[in-house]
Amino acid sequence: MTQFETFYSLVGAEDLEGAIQAAVDYADAEETLTGFLREGFVQSMSSTQGWTRDGGAIWKEHIRSEILDLVLANLRLNIEAFYQKNKKGAAPVIVACPDGETHTLGAKVTTSLLRIKGFNARFIGADLPADQLMSLVDSVKPAAVVFSVTHHYNLLALKDTITQLKGKFPQLLIAAGGASLRHNADAFPEVRVVTNHDALFEMIRGELR
Ligand code: B12
């Protein structure tokens, strides 16, 4: 039995209110909130693996991922309290999903974990065309751009976007992680893969010095 077992069963039972309430219990301390966001979210979706191969259960994924989205939204004030406590300066960190990528939970969790650590991270939405990202970087001058990519189909869009970004902003720190990169870390030499959040924090901290 893991510490998040109660939460998993509430999500499994599609009990939105119960899941929201259970999640709040992890939010008092930075360590439990961080552990919950890192492990609890991934694990509560892991039982859905294989449903789609069996055909016809995609709607269950939709219901569960919607519950997780709402759980995360409800934790936002707790996340912001840790951000205020740990604030490390104002330089923004942009968290993005490349063109085609509509899986947003990993990006939102990564944004939340960055904010808890005191980085001024903003998630800028799913499926972002490269030209929009270029315009955003030009306008806000971020300390870093962090990509989250879940579906391996979107790795080519990631590679193209990073190539364009590096062409125009050669000094910009760019990192990428997410499920699709866990087994494809060496796929493209131009993509700096970091799938561990601690390594991501270190990388960005270095950039802010
Ligand atoms: C939820 C979900 C959806 C939701 C997404 C809702 C949303 N708003 O995000 C919906 C229902 C919309 C969806 C749609 C689709 N999905 Co889907 N989906 C999933 C599911 C069930 C969970 C993914 C998830 O959110 N996990 C929880 C998050 C928190 O975990 P995570 O993303 O891995 O993030 C963690 C880490 O990776 C890390 N992280 C993430 N990004 C980064 C970045 C950095 C820098 C770092 C350091 C760390 C990091 O942080 C998180 C916490 O540790 C997975 C199956 C599974 N159980 O994994 C399939 C899955 C990802 N989907 C899949 C597919 C195929 C699709 C669809 C094409 C059709 C379908 N079968 O449903 C469409 C795609 C639409 C599109 N155009 O993109 C496949 C992908 C296969 C592949 N080879 O890549 C999977 C694996 C299912 C499967 N087994 O077939 N999906």
Image (spheres, helix red, strand yellow):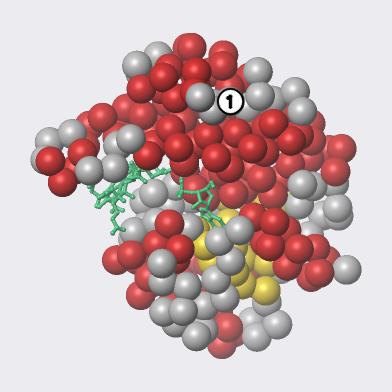
Q: Quadrant of residue 180?
A: bottom left
Q: Quadrant of residue 170?
A: bottom right
| Residue 128 in view of the camera | no
Along the line of sight, which residue is nearer the eye, 128 or 183?
183
Q: Name the residue carrying label 1.
A: 3
Q: Residue furthest left?
A: 55
Task: Identify whether 100 is placed above or below 86.
Answer: below
Residue 154 in the image: x percent, y percent? 35, 66
Could you tell whether 81 is left or right of 73 in the image? Answer: right
| Residue 51 in view of the camera | yes
Residue 93 in the image: x percent, y percent? 68, 59
Could you tell whether 72 is left or right of 197 in the image? Answer: left
Dot 1 crowding, Cα within 10 Å, few <14, some 14–19, many 20+: few
Could you tell whether 182 is left or right of 81 in the image? Answer: left
Locate the C terminus by quadrant: bottom right
Could you tell whether 17 is left or right of 73 in the image? Answer: left
Residue 206 in the image: x percent, y percent? 81, 69
In percent of the image, x 84 and y 38: which residue is there?
84
Inspect the image, locate mark 1, and give the three-letter code of the amino acid beneath it: Gln
Residue 142 in the image: x percent, y percent? 70, 65
- Which structural element holds mark 1? loop
Along the line of sight, which residue is nearer the eye, 32 or 144?
32
In percent of the image, x 29 and y 66: which residue is there?
153
In percent of the image, x 72 and y 45: which residue is there?
115
